[in-house]
Image (spheres, rainbow, N blue to C red):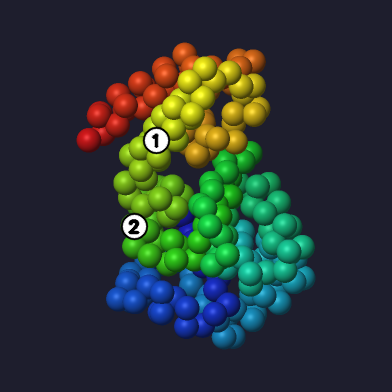
Amino acid sequence: MNKIILIEDRINRQKNMLGNLFEKLNDFPDLSNKSGGTDFEEIKQQLNYEKFGDIFNDFKIIMVHRSALETSVRNKLIDFCIENGKTLVLFSGGVSNATIEKKKNNSFIVLLNAQTFYSHNLIDFLNNKEHNPYILAFGKNWEINLLYEALEVFKRILLKEPEIKKPFGAFETEIPSTFVKEKYFKDFLNQNFIDKLILEKICNTLIHDINQII
């Protein structure tokens, strides 16, 4: 089981946002919950001195309220997690779209809205043996949600640009998730262009995989 630490500076936010789910946080012995008050202040002081190893060596997954850390500390924490193969989850009320980036050493950097984080997604994530970060960002039905989203995006692109032909670098920003990019575009990464035939082929594969799931 992966050990997890959750760092929140606002002492009442977990209870206010999770509501009846708040008490369930106590059901997970591998979760160390540092929520406001003295617990948070002690962690913050260590972070300001960049004692990342002292705090996080025993934890595989680190979840932090993004605004609780200064930018310089946050950036160094990101580097630490990537170098040490950890999952870092940064949540904030100012984040609009969830993003998940897989980095080297099998590390993940996750950015998501605080309301998405403090929801049933968090409980489902903690219950998941593998602690799949996609559950945290997109719910326990994350895969089919991402496939449906990608299919709709690509269909809209084909309607808008029926003779589409774009360099992959220019098209890449329109792929709605890293998961979809890695799974469905891996055979086309070396292509000079993404065109109508390729996109239609990917849409057909998405439809097939959605039907397999449902």
Describe the element under mark 2 as helix, strand or loop: helix
Q: Nearer the viewer, residue 171 or 30?
A: 171
Alpha-carbon distance for marks 2 and 1?
Answer: 26 Å
Quadrant of the frame with the C terminus: top left
Residue drawn at (64%, 29%), measured in percent from left and top? Answer: 170
The x and y percentages for residue 197 are 47, 14
Residue drawn at (62%, 41%), measured in percent from left and top? Answer: 103
- The amino acid type found where label 2 is placed reads Asp
The x and y percentages for residue 211 are 25, 29
- Asked if residue 190 shows in the view, the reply is no
Does residue 103 lie above or below 208 as drawn? below
Describe the element under mark 1 as helix, strand or loop: helix
Residue drawn at (68%, 46%), measured in percent from left and top? Answer: 83
- The numbered disc on residue 152 is 1
Which residue carries the number 2 mark? 124
Q: Are the residues flagged by discs 2 and 1 in contact, CB closer than 8 Å?
A: no
Q: Is residue 61 left or right of residue 118?
A: right
The x and y percentages for residue 98 are 51, 52
Q: Is residue 18 left or right of residue 194?
A: left
Q: Nearer the viewer, residue 213 or 207?
A: 207
Does residue 71 lie above or below 170 as drawn? below
Where is residue 205, by image quadrant?
Answer: top left
Quadrant of the frame with the N terminus: bottom left
The x and y percentages for residue 154 are 45, 30
Q: Is residue 67 left or right of residue 178?
A: right
- Name of the residue lying farthest toward the left: 214
Question: Quick one: label 2 or label 1, which is nearer the N terminus?
Answer: 2
- The amino acid type found where label 1 is placed reads Glu
- Asked if residue 119 shows in the view, the reply is yes
Does residue 176 lie above or below 6 as drawn? above
Q: Answer few, some or many: residues within 10 Å of disc 1's Cα (few below 14, many 20 plus, some between 14 and 19).
A: few
